Image (tube, helix red, strand yellow):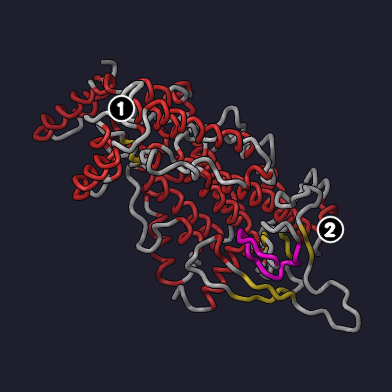
Amino acid sequence: MTMLPAFRSIVSRIAPAAKVAVALVLVLSVAAPALADEFVRKVNADYAKVQPSRRTETILFPAMSKLQAPPRGLERPLDAAMLPPTGSAWAAAEAWANAKPQRDVLDAVKKVTEVEQWKDAFALAQPYGADAADPDQVIEGLFTDLGDPPLLGAADFKYLPRWRTVEVLLHIEATRLQKEGKPLEALDAMVRNLWLGRQMADRVMFRESSTGYAQMMLALQRLRDIPFVDSRLESPVLTAENVRDIGRRLREPQGLLGIDRLLMPQGDRIAAEQLISKTMLPNAGANPDTFSPVLAAITSRGRPLRLFSETARWDALRSLHADTNQTTARLGIVYDDYTRRWALNYHDPVLRRPFDYTRTDRTRYSSMDVFVRDISQLFRDRHLLRVEAEGTRNALALYGYRLQNRRSAPSLAALRPTFIQNLELDVYDPRRAATLSYFVPMTRAVANAQPRPHEMQVFPELLDNRYQQFQISLRDDTFVLYSVGPDGAANGAVRATQTTEDPRGDYVVWPPMLSLVRKNLEDQGRFR
């Protein structure tokens, strides 16, 4: 009953006519902790250890509760990152970003990202379930609802849409700052966006963790996009020192980014164990009283009219299902496979084999589609995060060198030690023996011929499958930095195929894909 004072405080701020109903809801909520079982308590245990002064939700979520919806068409962070600072769409976005609720959110973001020593940094430590979260956050819908009774497998991450709106806001703010001639402040906003994504990636549930990975990768792309836009100005605003300082904030492994410290999320495994305990009988098989109702409630979530048909489907599958011991053993095999692979290098041949999750009999273990999340995506995302981080550090160093020396670096080696301490090896290179590939267009010697622009075909699938391929010509006023990409071979960056394995393609880091696609869309008049 230790939460009652907080409930009284909430009720005291509500109009008298509504107090009775709201108080009844809140008082009933006091009994909820008894419903949280050992599985929920297990996933919440580590969050209870985070110091109150380092909990992001206590500072950011109150501001998020007043966050206004972004202008139409800017619901996705990528759309916000892509928007140029021109036209009526930009005017609406800028006005939204400058409104007080959004400015308050930006102030809160600064507070929860101010510590960059990873052992002392802020953490998103909100526990799972309405009974465990702060009552104010529950009232505002900024929590993870586990239902009644609380089931981790039925988690509804109600706060995530507004978290993504914060990400949208940070991209609009970065564009606004650069438009006002403040690219260093724009870069700072993206570093803070990166740190927020890092907090989300540390969450123990797959959906949250994958959201964090996506947020970090887009932030890293903007950390190249902003300097590239600066580089196209007649008089760039950024200085070599500015760029070098941003690069140092992204250092590995001791910095806050710490990709090697990212753990495989374990919450979904605990959620699966909980569901087995709720839907199956010990040393027997499916529980006839709970198997179909519980699984149907989860698989029909958000579509209540399908509840009856889903219940009938699970009734039909129940008799075919493996027993409890076999199901528990299969769950262990699937997650042990994930765990072993998490520790492997990207080029380990084991990672090329099908995951045990995909080899599970979907008749005998039909519930696995509910119990188990296919987290194989995170293996790809973690590797891409390494590619993006390595590429961003090198690209910033190359731009810093150009700003300082008024010419492009002759090689990556020339960046040491002023802009980078150590040359990083291309994480896509199967031999792990070569750095990223680098050249300046129109500077290669060609016998009996004038230097020609570098022609590149761009396939922007990494950003969004709505974007179509196009071709660009690059001159010696920029440089090209690329990874060998999935096929492991350097092909001269003539085809920016990014994550698609292509015998002629590479993963181009600079010029930034985001910048190239935006310019292509502008040339097509897509932002008018």
Kindly state the secondary structure of the residue where label 1 is placed. Answer: helix
Q: Quadrant of the C terminus?
A: bottom left
Relative image position of residue 122 (x, y in whole percent) = 51, 32
Relative image position of residue 180 (x, y in whole percent) = 54, 61
**Label 1, on which residue?**
278
- Residue at the location (79% across, 43% down)? 421
Kindly state the secondary structure of the residue where label 2 is placed. Answer: loop
User: Which stretch is magenta?
Assistant: 490-503
Label 2 or label 1, whichever comes before in sequence order: 1
Which amino acid is tagged 1? Lys
Asked if residue 413 is positioned above or below residue 237 in the image, the reply reads above
**Label 2, on which residue?**
411
Residue that lies at the very extreme toward the top in this rendered image: 1
Residue that lies at the very extreme toward the left in this rendered image: 17
Magenta segment: does it hold 309?
no
Q: Which of the two residues, 373 or 186, is positioned nearer the viewer here?
A: 373
The rendered magenta stretch, by its main secondary structure, is classed as loop
Label drawn at residue 215: none
Asked if residue 281 is positioned above or below residue 241 in the image, the reply reads above
Relative image position of residue 91 (x, y in whole percent) = 41, 66
Asked if residue 339 is positioned above or below residue 103 in the image, the reply reads above
